[in-house]
Image (spheres, helix red, strand yellow):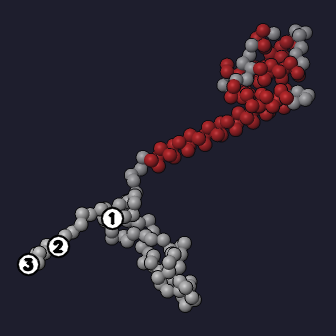
Amino acid sequence: MHKFSNTRLDAFPSVSAYCQELKVLADQLANINAPVDNERLVLQLIAGLNESYEGIATILQQQEPLPSFYTARSKLIQVETRKAEQALVASKTVTALNTTTSRAPPNTESPQQPYRSDYSRGRGMSRGHGRGRGSSDRSRYPHPNSYWQPPPYAPWMNSWSGYPPPQSPQYSPWTPPP
């Protein structure tokens, strides 16, 4: 009875092994005329869980009546399987992030999309021509789909701002009037 009462999940590699040991101990107690009923077995099963199973332990305790030992065991195995799958996905995500960040940075001098020469055409190439205000190519607001792209031959472009670097003003040499 002492061994049954002090069995904990932390001493086992899996929930299945933990549940199997509790069931074996309960069967051994039944063989010596000290049977363990389902309620006591489920309560011991819940009491031996660690904090990572706190959520399912609370759910199992709050069921009225308590679930059978096999139902509780099944739910614990489902939670264990879900935790293992989440850990696997998380490790793959970390591996993918490490792989992605260890690659060489992409070439920032050439644009990702081809150069669009119609960036100054206002509302686009086909909309608004010949219809009142804004019908010319000098429309006040550009079309949402026509955005400025730097030309591919612009090595002066700063990759983070899209503006040329500041330059000092150029003064042309001239002679003052007499």
Residue 172's disc is 2
Structural crowding at the residue carrying mark 2, measured as other residues with C-alpha within 10 Å and reported as few (<14), some (14–19) or many (≥20): few
Task: Kindly check if marks 1 and 2 are in contact, taking CB atoms under 8 A apart as contact.
Answer: no
Q: Quadrant of the N terminus?
A: top right
Task: Kindly check if marks 2 and 3 are in contact, taking CB atoms under 8 A apart as contact.
Answer: no
In the picture, measured across the screen, residue 95 lies left or right of residue 39, that is: left
Disc 3 target residue:
178
Mark found first going from the N terminus, 1 or 2? 1
Where residue 52 appears, as percent x and y from the top left, is: 68, 28
| Callout 3 secondary element | loop
Label 1 and label 2: CA atoms lie apart by 22 Å
**Which residue sits at x=56%, y=43%?**
92
Q: Is residue 175 above or below residue 96?
A: below
Disc 1 target residue:
164
Q: Quadrant of residue 165?
A: bottom left
Where residue 77 appears, as percent x and y from the top left, is: 75, 33
Label 2 and label 3: CA atoms lie apart by 18 Å
In the picture, measured across the screen, residue 115 lies left or right of residue 175, that is: right
User: Can residue 31 be seen by looking at this rendering?
Assistant: no
Where residue 96 appears, as percent x and y from the top left, is: 51, 46
Residue 175's disc is none
**Which residue sits at x=11%, y=75%?**
176
